[in-house]
Image: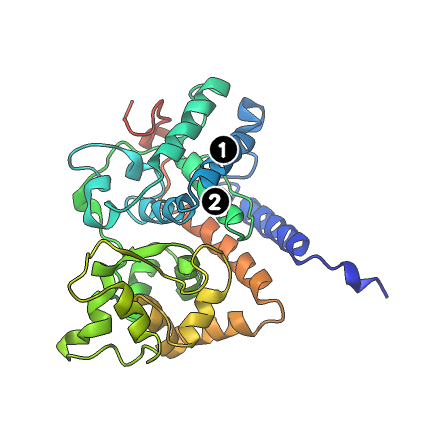
Amino acid sequence: MGNVTNFNPRFVLLLLFIVLAAATVHANHFLPRPRLGYYGTSCWNVESIVRSVVQSNYLDNPANAPSVLRMHFHDCFVQGCDASILLAGPNSERTAIPNLSLRGFNVIEEAKTELEIACPRTVSCADILALAARDFVVLAGGPWWPVPLGRLDGRVSLASNVNLPGPTDSVDVQKQRFAAKNLNTQDLVVLAAGHTIGTAGCGVFRNRFFNYNNTGSPDPTIAPSFVPQIQSQCPLNGDPATRVVLDAGSGDQFDTSYLNNLRNGRGVLESDQVLWTNPQTRAIVEQLLGLRFPFLWFGMEFGRSMTKMSQIEIKTGLDGEIRRVCSVVN
């Protein structure tokens, strides 16, 4: 028998990602979709340039990690993964209420500036955002996955188009929203677990801990010991903009703590906690937690679902462009 003492879960995870990504690319070779190795010699160091910018910004402010991950999600769920979230303007997607708390636009712009020096008019802002989201997850302790490239940037960004999954959505509503983007229930649970890093403003969820559905009491699905903890951070008449970590006890580390918190009734958002109270999504959470190496398999599933999400309604051909500056249409 081989020596099992040298087993490296992260190495196995990397190999699995490469095999799955290669199979996906082969199956869809006839479609105008992103692919691994897209830039080839036209910008051979695209990933290292983006990674370097991400690393410096993560060191300056680790909160960039959950914000850029969330930015990528918000971009893909509105008109597809086309970097329309990055466009500035009085009525752009940035100005929609769910996007007002997003940070990290400067990170993508900085990477774009570097890439315009190294590979002018070659790499799209949409590809930069997809790479940056992956690299921030890695720096926060999460998995690495290969990112297919070749998206184009969109030309339209309207706040009126922003219709994102909400913090009080039931499982049925969330499933409908994800299915509309060709994402299944497994993807829903796994991508929601991206809340293992990041925060939310008290105004988004405070009523759930004080006056759930106008009952005068907290949501009964919340663990009783968790209620006063959040109430003290988000007092009833306190600042609604105060931020609270979504993964209590492990808010800056990408791990499976979020899933454990759901099991223990310590989900901050109602849309998160219902993933445990609903039998179908609960089975997925239990499956991820019950595996021998839960972080290994959760990491693989997260990378797979992120890859699927990053190819929602992409722009190709005449549908898009490669911007010179990410915040402005050419």
Quadrant holding the C terminus: top left
Outermost residue, left side: 214
Residue 34 % position (x, y): 47, 39
Q: Mark 2 points at which residue?
A: 136
Q: Are marks 1 and 2 in contact (CB under 8 Å)?
A: no
Q: Position of residue 298 (x, y in %)?
A: 53, 62
Q: In which quarter of the image is the N terminus?
A: bottom right
Name the one closer to the observer, 3 or 210: 210
Instruction: Locate residue 34 relative to residue 79 in the image: left or right.
Output: right
**Residue in view at x 49 percent, y 56 percent:** 254
How was the colour assigned to the protein in this rendering? rainbow
Residue 30 visible to the viewer = yes
In this orientation, which residue lies closer to the viewer: 280 or 314?
280
Label 1 crowd bin: few (<14), some (14–19), many (20+), radius 10 Å = many
**Disc 2 secondary structure class:** helix
Q: Please tell me the numbered disc located at residue 176.
A: none
Q: Is residue 266 left or right of residue 16?
A: left
Q: Rounded to the nearest whole Å, what is the CA distance between mark 1 and mark 2?
A: 10 Å
Q: Which amino acid does label 1 sit on?
A: Val
First reached walking from the N terminus: tag 1 or tag 2: 1
* Residue designated by label 1: 50
Disc 2 packing (10 Å; few <14; some 14–19; many ≥20):
many
Q: Would you identify the image quadrant in which residue 299 lies?
A: bottom right
Task: Indicate left or right for 144 with 9 as reference.
Answer: left
Q: Position of residue 279 (x, y in %)?
A: 39, 79
Residue 123 lies, with reference to residue 254, above or below; the image says above
* x and y percentages locating residue 199 in the rendered image: 34, 55
Amino acid of disc 2: Phe
Residue appearing at x 41%, y 63% in the figure: 247
